[in-house]
Amino acid sequence: MAILAIVAAVTVTMLLAIAGHSPLTGPRLLPISSTHGVNEGDLVPLTAWVVACVSCWFLWRRTK
């Protein structure tokens, strides 16, 4: 159950990190609409989210 809480917390943190606007966002790599998309600055939070979720998945499989 703690693993699900960790995944939820990491997901919320990642969404907050990519929702903000910063001068370091960089160019848009994947446009979603005319005003929104995945920017270069979103890659770091997305990568950290993937690593955290995969790590939690391995922990969950190990505890079964």
Image (cartoon, grey):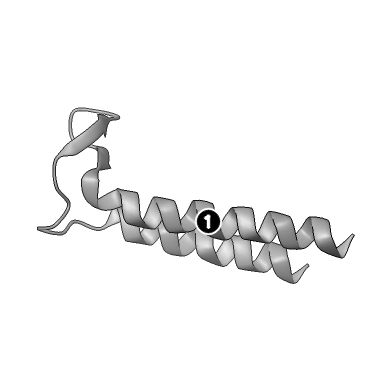
Label 1 neighbour load within 10 Å: few <14, some 14-19, many 20+: few
Locate the N terminus and report the quarter of the image it occupies. Answer: bottom right
Residue depicted at x 63% and y 59%:
55
Q: Image height check: is 42 above or below 38?
A: below
The part of the image, by quadrant, that contains residue 35 is top left
Q: Image height check: is 43 above or below 6?
A: above
Residue depicted at x 85% and y 64%:
63
Residue at image mark 1: 51
Check the image and name the residue furthest to the left.
23
Position of 27 compared to 32: left or right? left
Compare residues 10 and 51 and report the one nearer the observer: 51
Secondary structure beneath disc 1?
helix
The part of the image, by quadrant, that contains residue 36 is top left
Residue depicted at x 19% and y 56%:
21
How far across and down, in percent of the image, does residue 49 sit? 48, 56
Residue depicted at x 59% and y 61%:
8
Position of 3 compared to 34: left or right? right
How far across and down, in percent of the image, does residue 26 sit? 14, 47
Compare residues 40 and 7 and report the one nearer the observer: 40
Q: Image height check: is 56 above or below 42?
A: below
Identified by mark 1, the residue type is Val
